Image: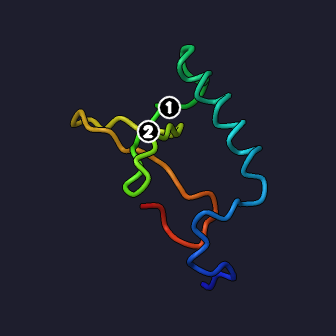
Amino acid sequence: MSFDTPNGTRGVPLPGADQVRQHNERVIAGVRAGGMPGMNMLVLITTGRRSGARRQTPVGYFAESSGTFLVVAGAGDAARNPD
């Protein structure tokens, strides 16, 4: 598998980033209002390692029988895996 997106694009706006941000804000509002039908979701809050910026991301999860959770997330088709 190969990618045509070079590494080192940090800070470059992705095409459609505003639409993704707006979609995420609607999903977060839905999760906080009582959840999304058909999927277990939570709002993952992280702090940027370098920027210190607080970020909120809606992600899906599965509850394990042991009481732990499996969180499902991705990097939106980015060239690198999410950190």
Q: Residue 17: horizontal and vertical position, in percent? A: 72, 51
From the viewer's perspective, is residue 33 above or below residue 53? above
Position of the N terminus, as image quadrant, is bottom right
The amino acid sitting under disc 1 is: Met
Give above or below for 57 relative to 30.
below
- Residue under pointer 1: 41
Image mark for residue 66: none
Which residue appears farthest toward the bottom when viewing the image?
2
x, y percent for residue 48: 42, 50
Q: Does residue 26 appear left or right of residue 64 in this picture?
A: right
In the image: residue 58, left or right of residue 54: right
Please report the residue visible at 50 percent of the width from the left and 31 percent of the height from the top: 41
Label 2 close to label 1 by CB (< 8 Å): yes
Distance from Cα at disc 2 to Cα at disc 1: 6 Å
How many other residues sit within 10 Å of disc 2, few (<14), some (14-19) or many (≥20)? some
Under circle 1, the secondary element is: strand
Query: In which quadrant of the rendered view does residue 5 lie?
Result: bottom right
Q: Nearer the viewer, residue 60 or 63?
A: 60
| The furthest residue to the top | 33
What percent of the width, then of the height, locates residue 16?
Answer: 78, 53
Name the residue rendered at 77%, 44% in the picture: 19
Task: Point out the tag, 2 or 1, that comes first from the N-terminus.
Answer: 1
* Residue neighbourhood size for the residue with mark 1, other residues' Cα within 10 Å, grouped as few (<14), some (14–19), many (≥20): many
- Farthest front residue? 51
The residue that label 2 is drawn on is 61
Residue at 68% in and 41% down? 21
Q: Residue at x 55, y 31 (%)?
A: 39
Circle 2: residue type: Tyr
